[in-house]
Amino acid sequence: MEEMNNQNRNNRAWILLCASLLAASGCGSSTAETTASTAVATAAAETTQATTAETGTYTDLDLLDLDGWWVRPEGYVSIGISLLDYFYVDSDTGTWTGYDDYGQENGMGGDVWIEDGCLVLTGALGDEENAIPILDEYTLVDDNGAPYFEWTDDPGFTGDVTESGITGQWFANGDTSSDTYYVFHEDFSSEKCVMGSITNDTYHVTDMTGSAPSFNGVSIGPENYNPMQITFDNDVFSSLTLIANGKAFLSDDQYFIHEGSENDPDVRSECVLMLRTWKMTDESGYYMDFYPNYGVALYDSSASEIAPGTWSVSGGVIRIQWENGTEDELSLEIGDENSTLHYDTEGGDFTNSEW
């Protein structure tokens, strides 16, 4: 089991790092970048040694000098999604471990040492070594010499799972009597119950930075979409993205609503709208998709005609604001298996049945 867990962590680390880990620190990514990184690292090392000679504090850095917590500097702005903002260097074992905003291990980690003025990390991008230039025992820099990570005795994790709205029970299709549900606990343990069969796991919460979905080159809905995502240690290929302002998520052609919101008809309507693609019942070939960022797209079967817009639900009424400035109101009839979307403006109904 331990070997399997390690393999799972390596898989997760590979997926996570593709987005960001050392995007700003190009050490080891190509011959040209390696040369540049080595030059920067050498310069950083020379600066450190020169400073050392002047101050008399130390002559050479070893791993013990960098032991402890490393976090992003205040005001740091990531290029893209930053998936490693905290890590711990253990000089006794010669290893490092990555952590998320909630103080949990994020599956990233490996061996660590100092070489040529860089802190070298393994286990982040496959078997490759990733080097971050060292300015001094308190600062790691990127290839431009800008602060990249800073040493601290208190990582100050910003996430609070109890305030995130994630803990508690999530009911399949909002049915509190269902024997299919999720439970998330404050200690990051979880249960997934499918028709009475329970699987135990541990989970992680990530604050994602999203962008508007693109459909055939057309941007749909708002750009500033920042959902929370839940991932698991054992079920590494499963992830849950919160929708409906954090009150629900979709999984296995079902929607799950958090306790306390299961009787909110607007939350349920939002879930049903996003669950599947909608097709016009008169076979005219028109479809409609509702996205978690509250973008909506109406399109024909060839997707040659796409009408983007935004949507909202209030008091049972679905309102769509199209990019061309027009507005529509729709009503939703929710069924046990399939549902119907009444769209009078288009002169017909849409269904979300699995046609």
Image: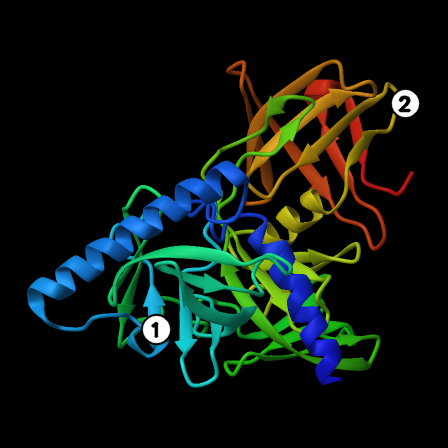
Amino acid identity at mark 2: Glu
Task: Residue under label 1, please give it.
Answer: 69
Q: Secondary structure at mark 2?
A: loop
**Residue 34: percent from the left, percent from the top?**
47, 44
Mark sitting on residue 283: 2
Name the residue rendered at 69%, 55% in the picture.
Answer: 250
**Residue 193: percent from the left, percent from the top?**
76, 77
Amino acid identity at mark 1: Trp
Q: Quadrant of residue 351?
A: top right
The answer to whether one can see residue 163 in this image is no
Q: State the residue lying farthest toward the left.
A: 54
Mark in the foreground, 1 or 2:
1
Residue 334 left/right relative to 22: right
Q: CA distance from mark 1 to mark 2?
A: 60 Å
**Residue 273: percent from the left, percent from the top?**
69, 43
Categorize mark 2 by other alpha carbons within 10 Å: few (<14), some (14-19), many (20+).
Answer: few
